[in-house]
Every structure is written in structure tokens, then in C-alpha cells.
Amino acid sequence: MTEGAIIDARDVSLTFQTNDGPVHALRDVNLSVEKGDFVSFIGPSGCGKTTFLRVMADLEQPTAGTVLVNGVSPEEARKARAYGYVFQAAGLYPWRTIGGNIRLPLEIMGYDRPVQARRVKEVLELVDLAGFEKKYPWQLSGGMQQRASIARALAFDADILLMDEPFGALDEIVRDHLNEQLLALWARTQKTICFVTHSIPEAVYLSTKIVVMSPRPGRITDVIESPLPRERPLDIRDTPEFLEIAHRVREGLRAGHAYD
């Protein structure tokens, strides 16, 4: 394992067997993520971004190579509750209140009621949803539902947060607001975040490290260490430094197509 890496992938490949023949989703992926990193994965649809995230989460099994999470296998990390996972859709149960949705993983894990109540209160404050505990999902906007989903993933205080394009379905104004809130949340909690996106500005704005992937089979064409400060106002997107990184991402995406 790479020294200091909280997630370490070595020569990871994954092939799905289908009725139409094998689908090569990932090929020879190598990546190290250090504690406290905010890593965005960007690439064309079907390039394996989400598949790689699911491998980290033990939701998919690689056909070759190894992945370590906190120095152990993804399965062991899952059993140790090392990460929270935020899906593309909020996935809140409509018959449960927001507080009830956030409590669900804590109930499953056997936390006692006072701890559940304390954690729900803490994470609702973290995502600026204090006072909405008794509301139902249908009473909240799409952006608020996604914040509730993030709160649920934070409820058991895992060190790693895996996020699969959580803001992709939201309009640009709401997305900008949630990007700002997510950066503030990351600064407060010091979590390690792995984030899938299709948006170049979003990837550059949020990340300490941007991983550019090629079309399927997904390979890493570039890993960009961001020189931007960790505290980033939204208008940093108009600076030459930001635009230079965005240009490099775009070039990396173009280069990926050369592998087709």
C-alpha cells in the first residue's frame, strides 16, 4: 500500500459478463487517495467512474488487481463502516420523516436512542437542515433532499464519503449553492471525499485532485493536483488559475478518446 494512502488501487480491471459478451468497464486503474483529499472522477458516460466508486464500496468486485480502503479490503472496510455512500438519487423513504431517514442506518447498526437523536441533530446542523427533522421528503426541494441524503451518509461518522454524482439532476443555481455547502462541510469535517461528476467546473471547483478517465474500458488519462487554495469562493471560477485547470481537464478528456 502507498504510504499515507487511505484508498489504494493497483492494476484494477473489471469485466462484466453479459448475454452480448464481455463488457470491459475498467482496465489497469492505479490510484492513491490520501486522508483528507477531495478527489473528483470525471469522464464520458460509461467510462467506469461509478463502477470504480462501487468497487471501493464493495458493491462490485474487480476481476483483476487490488483495492485497499484504510489498509484492508473493501469488504472489511464496509463491515467496519469506514465510509458513507451518497447515490445519484436521494433515495429517501417517503413514509419516514427526514429524521427517520437519517436514523435508519443508526437503527440498523444498533445505536441506542439517545445516540441516534444526538447524531441526527448534529448532521442536520452540518447540512443546514436544522428544524426539518419532522418533515417528510416530499415536503423538501430536490436540493434539500440531497442534503438530507448526505446527512444520512454522515450519521455514523465514517472517515470516507463516496458520492456518485449527487447534484447532477439539479439546476445550476441549486448546484452552485450545494457545491459551496459541500466545500464548507468538507472543511468542517475533514472527511476524505471521492466524488463522481460529469461537470468540469464542478470537478475543478471542489477538488484537491481531479482524476480524468477515458471512454470504456475506463483508464486514468490524467491525475491533476489542484493548486487552488482549500477555501474557494464561487467566483474563483473566473480566475486564470481555475480556467487553466479546466483546460487541462478538457484536454485530458480529449486525449482519452485517442484510446478508442
Image (spheres, rainbow, N blue to C red):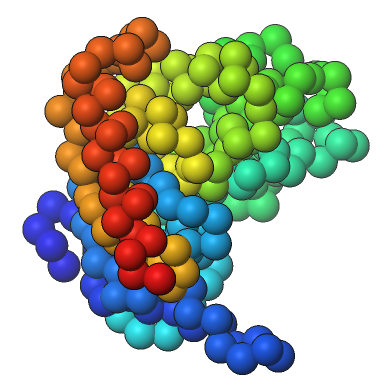
Q: Residue at x 33, y 64 (%)?
A: 258
Considering depth in this image, is 103 or 53 the residue closer to the camera? 53
Considering depth in this image, is 82 or 63 the residue closer to the camera? 63
> Which quadrant of the view contains residue 206?
top left
Q: Does residue 95 appear to the left or right of 89 in the view shown?
A: right
Considering depth in this image, is 102 or 88 the residue closer to the camera? 88
Q: Is residue 154 visible?
A: yes
Q: Position of residue 201 (x, y in %)?
A: 41, 28
Q: Residue furthest left?
A: 3
Q: Residue furthest right?
A: 95
Q: Position of residue 157 (x, y in %)?
A: 45, 38
Q: Position of residue 90 (x, y in %)?
A: 69, 38
| Residue 222 higher or lower than 177, as above or below | below
Q: How many marks?
A: 0
Q: Residue at x 47, y 22 (%)?
A: 179
Q: Position of residue 257 (x, y in %)?
A: 38, 61
Q: Is residue 158 visible?
A: no
Q: Does residue 42 appear to the left or right of 105 in the view shown?
A: left
> Which quadrant of the view contains residue 114?
top right
| Residue 33 higher or lower than 146, as above or below | below
Q: Does residue 146 appear to the left or right of 138 in the view shown?
A: left
| Residue 224 higher or lower than 185, as above or below | below
| Residue 26 higher or lower than 195, as above or below | below
Tell me the quarter of the image containing the N terminus.
Answer: bottom left
Q: Residue at x 56, y 88 (%)?
A: 22
Q: Residue at x 40, y 71 (%)?
A: 260
Considering depth in this image, is 221 or 10 the residue closer to the camera? 221
Q: Does residue 42 appear to the left or right of 227 in the view shown?
A: right
